[in-house]
Image (cartoon, helix red, strand yellow):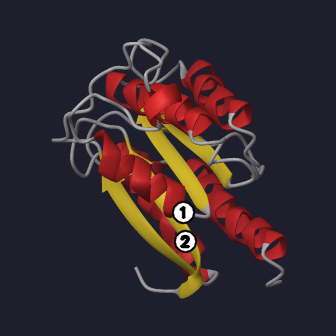
């Protein structure tokens, strides 16, 4: 997706399914952000090996995570971005294990590197069949808050409903909430950078 090189928004899809409802929702947000002039990128955690944090705290000394897997390229993209979106389906009222591994390790490493996410703009998108949205949304928002990031609001909570492939496309309110969130992200980033 093309746009102004001055603003970059990264969308991370934490679903183990390619093209699933979470990816659809994140893409809707990124399209809205691109329409406002942002350059966007989608990263799928599907097919990537992201091991859980083992709490060793060696990153505090080395400024790197010792675990050898696919985490570092994703983390580097997070650092480069002005805005970060993390999308997850609900698994037993929680984010997926892939998302949990990313936020745990990125959070620790960010602190070790001097809080590299501080004052970036970010937020979460959550999809579920019926329930568990708010628990998962809160879980992810705690990551952004802990990292000192700025979280825009939208026209509703950033949640949508869908179970079967493409089901989220029937939730027009959820889709519009996601789009509005993308627009708000760009609006805030432009003001932070003195562009708007």
Q: Which element is circle 1 on?
A: loop
Q: Residue at 71% of width from left, 47% of height from top?
A: 118
Residue at image x 74%, y 64%? 184
SS category of the residue bearing label 2: strand
Q: Is residue 53 visible?
A: yes
Do callouts 1 and 2 mark residues in contact (Cβ within 8 Å)?
Answer: yes
Q: How dense is the environment of label 2, judged by Cα within 10 Å: few (below 14), some, or many (20 and up)?
A: many
Q: Residue furthest left?
A: 47
The percent position of residue 78, horizontal first and vertical second, equals: 49, 53
Quadrant of the frame with the C terminus: bottom right
Give how far apart the Cα atoms at labels 1 and 2 are. 5 Å
Give the camera-side residue of 95 and 130. Answer: 95
Tell me the tag on residue 8. Answer: 2
Report the residue at 50% width, 44% height from top: 86
Q: Nearer the viewer, residue 95 or 119?
A: 119
> How many numbered marks, from 0 up?
2
Give the x, y percent position of residue 183. Answer: 68, 68
Q: Residue furthest front?
A: 61
Quarter in which the N terminus is drawn: bottom left
> In this rendering, does residue 129 appear at all?
no
**Quadrant assignment, res 134:** top right
Please tell me in which quadrant of the rendered image residue 48 appears. top left
Q: Which residue is mark 1?
A: 81
Instruction: Report the front residue among 164 and 23.
Output: 23
Q: Of the two numbered discs 1 and 2 on the same chain, state the one appearing first in sequence.
A: 2
Figure quadrant of residue 88 = top left
In the image, residue 196 above or below residue 65: below
Query: In the image, is 184 to the left or to the right of 33?
Result: right
Counting from the top left corner in percent of width and height, residue 129 is at 42, 27
The x and y percentages for residue 132 are: 54, 18
């Amino acid at each position: 997706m093309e746009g102004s090189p001055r603003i970059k928004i990264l969308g991370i899809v934490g679903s183990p399914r390619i093209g699933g409802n979470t990816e659809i929702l994140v893409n809707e947000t990124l399209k809205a952000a691109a329409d406002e002039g942002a350059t966007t990128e989608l990263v799928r955690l599907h097919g990537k090996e992201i091991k859980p944090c083992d709490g060793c705290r060696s990153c505090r000394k080395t400024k790197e995570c010792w675990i050898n897997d696919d985490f570092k390229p994703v983390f580097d993209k997070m650092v480069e971005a002005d805005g970060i979106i993390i999308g997850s389906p609900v698994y037993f009222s929680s984010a997926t294990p892939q998302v949990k591994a990313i936020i745990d390790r990125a959070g620790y490493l960010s602190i070790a590197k001097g809080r590299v996410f501080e004052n970036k703009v970010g937020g979460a998108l959550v999809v579920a069949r019926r329930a568990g949205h708010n628990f998962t949304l809160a879980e992810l928002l705690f990551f952004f808050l802990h990292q000192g990031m700025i979280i825009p609001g939208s026209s509703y909570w950033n949640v949508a409903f869908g179970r079967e492939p493409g089901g989220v496309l029937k939730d027009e309110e959820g889709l519009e909430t996601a789009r509005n969130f993308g627009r708000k992200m760009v609006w805030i980033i432009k003001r932070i950078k003195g562009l708007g």
